[in-house]
Image: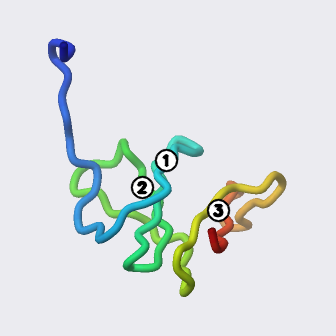
Amino acid sequence: MPETGSQVTTLLTDIALGESARWHDARFWMSDWVAGEILSVDVDAPSPRRPDVVARSTSFPFCFDWLAGRHDARHGKRRPRASRC
């Protein structure tokens, strides 16, 4: 039975083939295999939300994860590492 008052909202649109959905550093991360992009989005941002393209891949399929000790120099946060699945 659904909870009273629960609400479904759309987080992103225009994703051709979304894969590898993850929550990390208070952001939603995913890959769009058709676009060859790894995307990150702030779920608390006002709509329409614009995802950040944080990496691109030319291989298919691809996945991503975080490695300990790897940080983005611009933001001081860990960035994902893309690889072939």
Question: In the figure, is residue 48 to the left or right of 24?
Answer: left
Q: Could you tell which of marks 3 and 1 lies nearer the N-terminus? A: 1
The residue tagged 3 is: 80
Please tell me which of labels 2 and 1 falls first in the chain: 1
* Disc 2 element: strand
**Among all residues in the image, which is located at the extreme right?**
69
Rendered residue at 46%/79% (across/down): 36
In the structure shown, which secondary structural element does the residue marked by tag 3 occupy? loop
Q: In this view, does 5 lie above or below 78?
A: above
Give the mark count: 3
Tell me the kind of residue under disc 2: Val
Classify the position of the N terminus by image quarter. top left
How much space separates mark 2 and mark 1, taking CA atoms? 6 Å
Q: For residue 75, which quarter of the picture?
A: bottom right
Q: Which mark is residue 41?
A: 2
Pointer 1 residue: 27
Residue 13, image quadrant: bottom left
User: Disc 1 residue type?
Assistant: Arg
